[in-house]
Amino acid sequence: MTHPNSLPTNGPTSLDPSVGGVQSSIAPSQYSSASPDIGGMLANLQFAAQAVSGEAGADTGQNEQTVVENRLAAVRLGVATSLYYALRAKHAATAAHGLRVALFCSSWSEAMGLESDHRDRIEVAALLHDVGKIGVPDRILRKPGKLTVDEQLAMDTCPAQSCQILRGCTGDLDLLDIVRYGGVWFDSRRDDEAPRGDALPLGARMLSIADAFDAMTTEQVYRPAMSRDGAIAELVRGSGTQFDPTLVNDFSRLLESKPEILQGTMVHRWLQQLRPEDSRDYWTGATSFSPDRPRKARGETVRRETLFNTQLHKSLKDGVAYTDSEGSIEIWNAAMERMTGLTSDAMIGKQWSATALRMRDADRELDDQLICPLQECLDTGESVRRSMVIETPGSDPLSVHVEVAPVVGLKPGSIGTVIVIHDLSDRKNLEQRLSSLHRQTRLDPLTRVSNRAHFDETLEQMVEQTAKGGPTFSLLICDIDHFKRINDTYGHPAGDDALKVFANILKAHSRDGDLVARYGGEEFLLLAASCDNATGAKRAEVIRQALEQTAVESLDGECMTASFGVTEFQSGDSGETVLARADRALLKAKDNGRNRVIQLGLGKMSEVAAEPQRGGWFDWLTGNDESTSTVVDILMPVPIDLAIEKLRGFVSDHHAEIVNVAENQLSLKVTSRPTPGGRRRVDHKITFHVVLTLSAAQQDEMLSQNADQASFTKVHLEIKPIRNRDRRRRDLNDAAKELVASFRCYLMGELLPNRTS
C-alpha cells in the first residue's frame, strides 16, 4: 500500500482494533528448521547436478502453474471487478501494481499450501489493497518526485479509505483486516492499538512483503528499479522490524526456486481465461498509449494510422512526449528513454516536470530558477523553443534542443502538447563506431546481425568501460525453444527462416548503442547499453511476447517461443563471468518450463548502495613472506542454505575449482580476470587460493540491532596468490580487490571490519 514514489514505511492505521486477524493454517513447524548442515550443503557443490529433461521440466512447471492460474481465475471477484476498473481509470500504474502484487501472493499462497478460501481472500485483498487511492488527489498520485510530509500523510489514509470502500461490498472481516494491516510494521511501535508480530493476519504480513518487493523492482522517476537480488536484500534488512523474518525467508526461497512468477506469462493466460473477450491491456491498466506497448483493440480493428504512428515513434532518433492539457504525460518514446534514462512505465501518467527530469537551461546551473517550457507553452498557448541540458547521473550532461508545441482541437484552447527533444551532442553509439570498420566481416551471413567475434570484442570493451566508471550494461541471452523439432518437422530451410525472423525481432527491439549478435545455432545475444538488470528483464519480456505472437510463414503460420537469461555487469566481472551468469539464467529458464525470462545478479547499482569501505580491510604485507594474504568478512542478508546457492553461482560463472570441503569450510582455486599489460594473455591472469568459512551471523555483527539474526550468514574469506612470483606483481592488489568485490556481489553482502594476516 505505497505511493509509487515511496517504499512502504507507513505506520499502522487502525479502524477496528477489536477485530482479530486471520490465523495461518500452516503449523509453526512448517516455518522453522533445525540447525543447517553446512558441511553437507557445501559438499553438494562438488557434484554436478543431474541433468533434468527439458520436456519433463516443461510439463512439471506448466502443471504447477496451471493449478495456480485456475485458482486465481476462480476467485469470486463480483463487485471487485468494477472497483478494480475504477482504480485503473483513476491511476493506471496503481492498478497494475495491485495486479502484480495479487499474482505474487497467489503463487506464494499456492506454494505454502493455504486452504482455498484463505488463498482467495489474500488474492482479492492484494488486488484491491490500494483501492483507497481513488480518494487521493491527482496532484499527489501523479507527482513525479518524492512526496512531502503532508502529501505522505495523505497517502497514509489509503488503508482506511480502502477498508471503507470495500465495506460497501463485503462483510468479510478477515479480508478487511488484510487490507487494514497490510502496511503495519511487523514490530510496530508507533501505534499501541495495532497488533504486532504473529498477531498480524498472515495475509497482511504476506501483502506487506509482496507490496514492498514490487515497489522496489518497479521503475520510478527518481530511482531505477532494483534487481531481484537487490530487492531481496532490502527485504531481509527490514526483517524483524518492518517484515516478518520467517515469511521474508520463505518468499526469498520461492523466488530462488521459481523466479518465473515475476514474468508476464501467468498474467496473460489468467486474464485471457477470466475474460476471453477482453485483451490483456483491459486488466494491466495500459490506458495510455505507449510506443513500446502498442494498443490492442477490444472487439475492433486497429486503425492503420495507429500502427504507422507506433512505428514512427519507435524509429525516431528525437525524443517525443505527448501531454494532456494538465501536463500529464501520455506518450514517452524510446528516444526519450535513452536521453533521460527514464522508462515509459515510470513516466506515463506522471506530471511533466523539468526539475524532476534534471533539465536546465543551457546558460544556467541546475539550482537556478527555471521557467518550465511546458508550463510556458500552456500559459501562452504558443510554441516554446529552448536550448537546454539534461543532467543524467553517471553520464556527461546532454545538450539538447527542446520544442514544446500546443495541440489545438476544434474548440478554443489547447487539448495538450507535443514535446520534441533533439540531441545536439552528436555522440555516436558504440555499434555505429565499430560497424564502420570491416562491417561485412563482423556480420552473421544468415541473419545479418553481428557474429560471435564481433560480440566478444564489443563485450570486452563494454566491460572495460563500465569497470572504469562508465555506464552499466545488461546482457540478454536467448534461445529458440525446441529448435530441433522445427528442423525435423519443417526442414532446415524453414529453420533458417525462423532464425531470420527471431533476429529481425531482436533488431526491431534494440536501441542506439545496443548490439544484437548470433552466438551460434539458435542462440542469440543482445548487449543492452546503459541498461540495468530490471530494465533488461523488462525488455526481454517484451521481446518474448512479440516472438510468441509472430506467425512464421515457413512454419505453416505457427508461432515459436524462446527462453531468456538476463544479467547486468557487476563489480569484479569479466566478459566471461557476465556471459556465464546470463547463460546460467537461460538454463534456469529452460529448466523451469521454457518461454520465460529469468534474471540473475545484483547489478552495478550495488556499488552505490554499498556501505563505505572501512579502513584497513585490505592491508597487504610486502616482501616474499608466503603468508601474504587478505582476509575479509562478508555479511550476507540471507540464511545459510540460500548463501550456498549464491556461492554455487560464483563457482559456476568463474569456473572455480573446488579443492576441498571440510565441515563449514570450502577451498577454491580461482583465476582473476585478464588485466591490461604483459606480452602473453596468460600473464594477465593471477590464480588465487580462496578459503571460505560459513557461519551464522552473531548479534554484535549485525548492521542493525533490530535485524533478525537467523536471516543473515557470515562468510569469512581468505585470499592468497598461489605462485610466489605473483606476490611481486604490481597489479596483484587490484586483482585481489576485484575478486573480493565479485564475491560481495554474488553473495549480496556487505563488508565487515576484519583482520589482515
Image (cartoon, rainbow, N blue to C red):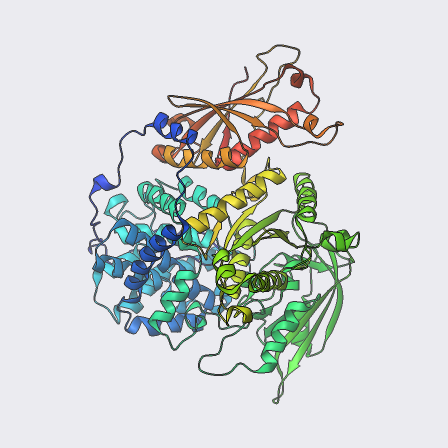
Q: Position of residue 390 (x, y in %)?
A: 70, 57
Left or right: 216 in relation to 17: right
**Position of 462 relative to 424 (above/below):** above
Q: Is residue 697 visible from the viewing direction of this image?
A: no
How many numbered dots are placed on residues in this image? 0
Image point (37%, 21%), residue name: 663
> On screen, 648 above or below 695?
below
Quarter occupied by the C terminus: top right
Q: Is residue 519 visible?
A: yes
Q: Position of residue 243 (x, y in %)?
A: 35, 45
Where residue 436 sits, quadrant-wise, is: bottom right
**Residue 283 appears left or right of 187:** right
Hey, which residue is sitting farthest bottom in the picture? 410
- The quarter holding residue 291 reads bottom right
Question: Residue drawn 73% across and 72% down?
Answer: 384
Quadrant (top left/top right/bottom left/bottom right) for the N terminus: bottom left
Nearest the eye: 332 or 198: 332
Residue lying at 66% horizontally and 11% vertically, measured from the top left: 623
**x, y (%) of residue 472?**
63, 46
Q: Position of residue 107 (x, y in %)?
A: 33, 55
Q: Nearer the viewer, residue 494 or 568?
A: 494
